[in-house]
């Protein structure tokens, strides 16, 4: 359902709230690009009136009033579980879980893994910015080997903290037939939107669990200027985390 907009810039997705406010993300944050791609995907599929959006605690919660859709704020790490409950209670709704890498891969990993194992018919979106953004840049499961954070001042040690989590690879290996799994990046928003559309379509078709990780930027905690922010995203992050489709209903799939 297209919603008539009054004071939204034409480039904004129609499903954004018409009472626009200044967004709350830091300058250069990737969350806004991820959300714009998601909003356009919702618009293009024409599902705004069916969407229920659940947001984790973290900088992702700043998306709570972005879209003109029903939105639920969950406890940190519990977004996939809450989203699953809503979907089971209202199967005709399109339920989207939105979280950070701390929420999804650390405290909430059990919910992500078990939602995938049960092939829950939800769309789960995880923003990988290699740190805990909201709480000041602590090490996350996705922090790169050698990357300095507030809690790894000498760089992440693989010996002590293990290898970074590769979520889509893990979910693709365990989710059942009909699941959709991909990793995109804010460096390629059109491709990211394509993945979101496919992940939403999988839910609309009832085919299986849909999971998209989005590589994103956090210049505030990385302490980077615009040039260094983009260089980190397209250099070390892209190297550690290949983008592409890892599982497509009926097809399989592999990273680029
Ligand atoms: C149960 C619980 N534990 C810890 C916290 C503190 N906390 C708030 S946000 C956050 C980390 C968020 O990081 P991430 O999930 O990576 O999202 P980002 O802010 O980077 O988008 C933590 C640990 C909390 N709110 N609730
Ligand atoms: S702290 Fe990082 S993730 Fe959070 S809004 Fe700022 S740039 Fe974005």
Image (cartoon, helix red, strand yellow):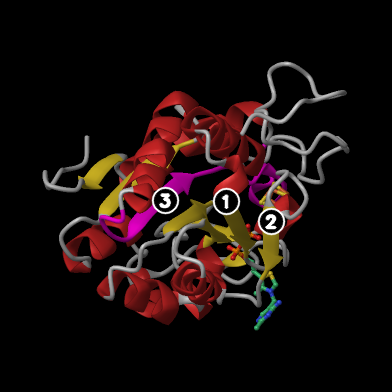
Q: Nearer the viewer, residue 189 or 206?
A: 206
Which residue is located at x 35 percent, y 70 percent? 158
Chain-order first, disc 3 or disc 1:
1
Real-space Cα separation, disc 2 to disc 3, in angstroms = 22 Å
Q: Quadrant of the C terminus?
A: top left
Residue 1 lies left or right of residue 120; in this view the side is right
Chain-order first, disc 1 or disc 2:
1
Which residue is located at x 18 percent, y 65 percent? 176
Q: Is the residue under label 3 in contact with that under label 2 (CB below 8 Å)?
A: no
Which residue is located at x 27 percent, y 51 percent? 180
Point out the quarter of the image occupied by ligand 1: bottom right
Q: Where is residue 207 in the image (x, y as percent from the top left)?
A: 25, 55
Q: Give the residue furthest to the top.
A: 10
Chain-order first, disc 2 or disc 3:
2
Can you identify the residue that label 3 sits on?
Answer: 213
Which numbered mark, 2 or 3, is in the foreground of this view? 2
Q: What element carries label 3?
A: strand
Q: Nearer the viewer, residue 19 or 206?
A: 206
Can you identify the residue that label 2 sits on?
Answer: 70
Establish if 124 lies above or below 226: below
In the image, which disc is placed on residue 51? 1
Q: Residues within 10 Å of mark 2 (few under 14, many from 20)?
A: some
Reply yes or no: does residue 214 show up in magenta.
yes
Q: How crowded is mark 1: few (under 14 residues within 10 Å), some or many (20 or more)?
A: many
Q: What stretch is highlighted in magenta?
A: 206-224
Disc 2 residue: CB within 8 Å of ligand 1: no
Q: What element carries label 2?
A: strand
Residue 58 at least partly seen: no
Q: Where is residue 73 in the image (x, y as percent from the top left)?
A: 70, 67
Q: Is mark 1 on a helix, strand or loop?
A: strand
């Amino acid at each position: 359902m297209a919603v008539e907009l009054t004071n939204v810039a034409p480039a904004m997705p129609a499903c954004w709230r018409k009472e626009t406010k200044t967004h709350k993300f830091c300058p250069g944050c990737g969350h806004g690009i991820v959300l714009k791609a998601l909003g356009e995907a919702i618009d293009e599929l024409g599902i705004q009136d069916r969407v229920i959006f659940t947001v984790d605690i973290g900088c992702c919660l700043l998306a709570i009033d972005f879209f003109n859709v029903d939105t639920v704020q969950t406890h940190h790490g519990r977004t996939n579980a809450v989203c699953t409950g809503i979907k089971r209670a209202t199967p005709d709704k399109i339920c989207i879980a939105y979280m950070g890498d701390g929420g999804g891969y650390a405290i909430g990993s059990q919910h992500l893994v078990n939602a995938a194992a049960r092939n829950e018919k939800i769309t789960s979106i995880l923003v990988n910015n290699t740190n805990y953004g909201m709480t000041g840049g602590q090490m996350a499961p996705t922090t790169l080997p050698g990357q300095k954070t507030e809690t790894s001042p000498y760089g992440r040690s693989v010996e002590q903290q293990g290898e970074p989590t590769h979520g889509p690879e893990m979910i693709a290996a365990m989710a059942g037939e009909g699941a959709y799994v991909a990793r995109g990046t804010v460096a390629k928003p059109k491709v990211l939107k394509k993945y979101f559309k496919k992940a939403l379509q999988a839910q609309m078709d009832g085919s299986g669990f849909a999971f998209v990780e989005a590589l994103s930027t956090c210049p505030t905690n990385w302490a980077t200027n615009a040039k260094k922010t983009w260089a980190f995203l397209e250099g070390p992050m892209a190297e550690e985390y290949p983008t592409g489709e890892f599982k497509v209903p009926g097809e399989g799939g592999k990273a680029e």
